[in-house]
Image (spheres, rainbow, N blue to C red):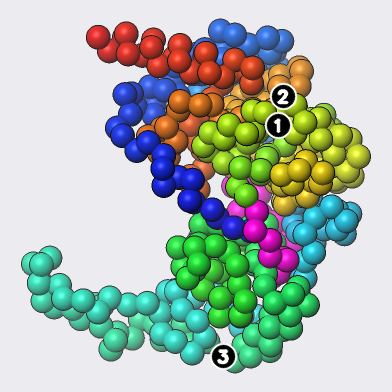
Amino acid sequence: MTNNSSELQGADSSPAMYTEEEARTAISALALANSQGAEPVTDNQGEAVDDEDDSLLFAPLTQSEVDNCAFSSWYPNFSRVTFKSEIIRPLDPEFIKYLLSDGVFVPGQKPMEYHGELEEFGSSNGSDWSDSDDDNDGNVIEDISSTTAEISRRIELLGGSAFPRTTWSAPTDADWASNTGTLQCKTPQDVYWLLKASNKIAKDLTHERYSGQPATAEPELVLREWANLHPSMVFRCFVRNNVLVGISQVDVQFHKFLNEMSSDIELKLTKFFAAHATKFLSSSFCYDVYVARTVDRVLVMDFEPWSHDVDSCLFEWRELCTTTEFLGLRLFPEGVNPLGHFSAKYSSSRFPIEMTADAYHASVATIIERMKAEQN
């Protein structure tokens, strides 16, 4: 996978005319006013739930729903429509200890420490930051050479280049630790840097990926065949009670060519759902796919449970949980500044655009003008 940020370089980074919270509120209000077919939001007993707490829209996750999203659980059923992958398990306990130890380092090196001058902070005493500190004694890692050799062997099987992940997550929050700014790995050391720098991986290994439900799946390291993918062609599909209820662009920026391809993309993804995604073991779930630019092929990237811990992208979870009809494909609208209106790329929730796909441009313009008028 590649994290292609070149298109962001030309994005408008001027200050927003309104705050993210104001935009979120205004767009949510517009969605509520224009919604069709939505049912009152109730809990399992039919009682109305708090409109502000999306977590109340969800039944508690079960262990099976979490375990179904473990890579080795779904990969056998989807191996023909996903990237070639190598699964390493069981993992050496020393390797897991290494991944959970403090600091970002590869075996044989010390964790990253501060070595600069501290006078500008009002103190020249760097004792808490020095190499002589004994706090890292617990991070002594025993030999993990067998894991290193196995990773090398599996990378070669994948053509000499791969991207890593663990049971539920890829280290997409750690591309800053890569020399290339991507998840591409050619050596075990490349893999180690990404895994050690990732909070997502740490949560995977401690079974904290999804709140409120520990999982039972065995920890695993997965190496997947590397491919240069265009972020604009990644889409998230939402399935509730075995029905596809919505599809969203994942990349938070406008791409004109997607509007021209939108009908073909939506048709391709609905057909893919009917032909393949119905084999997934849970009845409600989310999954990410990559659509080839020629729209000739769709590849599964990952599965996630139906949970408020999962990013709902250009939808709000309230819509997805209450709709009685297919909400269609949503694309990022023209004229909205992603740098000005979106939180960090890997935050738990993104600024939602609540409108139908064929009314994006007009609706966003209306919202902006309304908020400007209210400020005057």
Question: Rounded to the nearest whole Å, what is the CA distance between mark 1 and mark 3?
Answer: 53 Å
Query: For the residue labelled by badge 2, is the local secondary structure a helix, a strand or a loop?
Result: loop
Q: Position of residue 13 (x, y in %)?
A: 34, 38
Q: Residues within 10 Å of mark 2 (few under 14, many from 20)?
A: some
Q: How many marks?
A: 3
**Depth check, front residue: 346 or 291:** 291
**Depth check, front residue: 317 or 333:** 333
Q: Is residue 122 magenta?
A: no
**What's the amino acid at mark 3?**
Glu
The mark that comes first in sequence, 1 or 3, is 3
Q: What's the magenta region?
A: 209-229
Q: Is residue 247 left or right of residue 346?
A: right
Front of the two marks 1 and 3: 1
The mark that comes first in sequence, 2 or 3, is 3
Residue annotated with mark 3: 142
The mark that comes first in sequence, 2 or 1, is 1
**Depth check, front residue: 110 or 295:** 295
**What's the amino acid at mark 1?**
Met
In this view of the protein, can residue 295 be seen by the observer? yes
Who's the residue at 51% across and 37% down the image? 253
Tell me if label 2 and label 1 are in contact, CB under 8 Å: no
Query: For the residue labelled by badge 3, is the local secondary structure a helix, a strand or a loop?
Result: loop
Residue annotated with mark 1: 261
Who's the residue at 33% across and 23% down the image? 18
Who's the residue at 64% across and 28% down the image? 259
Q: Position of residue 143 (x, y in %)?
A: 59, 92
Q: Position of residue 147 (x, y in %)?
A: 67, 84
Residue annotated with mark 2: 328
Front of the two marks 2 and 3: 2
